[in-house]
Amino acid sequence: MKSTLCKDIVNSFVSVAKGLWVTVTHWSPARPSVTELYPDVMPELPENFRGMPTLPVNPKTGRSGCIACGACMRMCPEQIIKVVADKGDPKERKPAEFTIDISRCMWCGLCMEVCPTNCLKPARTFEHACYTRECMVYTLEDLMKLGGTLPEEPESVESEESS
């Protein structure tokens, strides 16, 4: 019994020494700080950041590339996307209503992957906090504002060669 008590005392001191060593190495000035100074300094988002789905506007047409097919609505595991197609010209399909309730969104990105026109893009922001549930529901206009505009496409190579 005396030998197990001595082993327990020695093991306790070794455990405390290991814990203190970890703490001392983290205090070292040579080690970079892991503390983020948010909100004073905004963190740099990684390239593969999955943000809230948005609908960027095409600068040539002035509207998003959404054709109101409903693929995103069917794919969403949380069923938070609602798309209603405009009853106008069937050749010019566009959404009459497009809403996303991000209070239940799990940021999986499936809606963006399944979009046939690739018009849903992730927002490069992560601050979506608000005080009411109603402000977490984004309409078509809100999503187009958040998405900004698509970058201008460079002129085709053929037009440059013909000049």
Image (cartoon, rainbow, N blue to C red):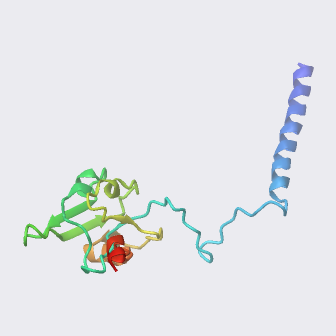
Q: Is residue 20 above or below residue 60?
A: above
- Residue 8 position within the rendered picture, expressed as x and y whole percent measured from the top left: 86, 29
Q: Is residue 70 left or right of residue 137?
A: left
- Residue 105 position within the rendered picture, expressed as x and y whole percent measured from the top left: 36, 58
- Residue 25 position within the rendered picture, expressed as x and y whole percent measured from the top left: 83, 53
| Furthest residue toward front | 162
**Residue shown at the point (27%, 51%) measured from the top left:** 75
| Furthest residue toward top | 1
Q: Quadrant of the N terminus?
A: top right
Q: Is residue 41 left or right of residue 56?
A: right
Q: For this rendering, which residue is in front, 24 or 124?
A: 124
Q: How many marks?
A: 0
The answer to which image quadrant residue 5 occupies is top right
**Residue shown at the point (31%, 56%) measured from the top left:** 111
Q: Is residue 95 left or right of residue 54?
A: left
Q: Is residue 132 above or below residue 74?
A: below
The answer to which image quadrant residue 16 occupies is top right
- Residue 93 position within the rendered picture, expressed as x and y whole percent measured from the top left: 14, 68
Q: Quadrant of the C terminus?
A: bottom left
Q: For this rendering, which residue is in front, 111 or 35?
A: 111
**Residue shown at the point (85%, 59%) measured from the top left:** 28
The answer to which image quadrant residue 106 occupies is bottom left
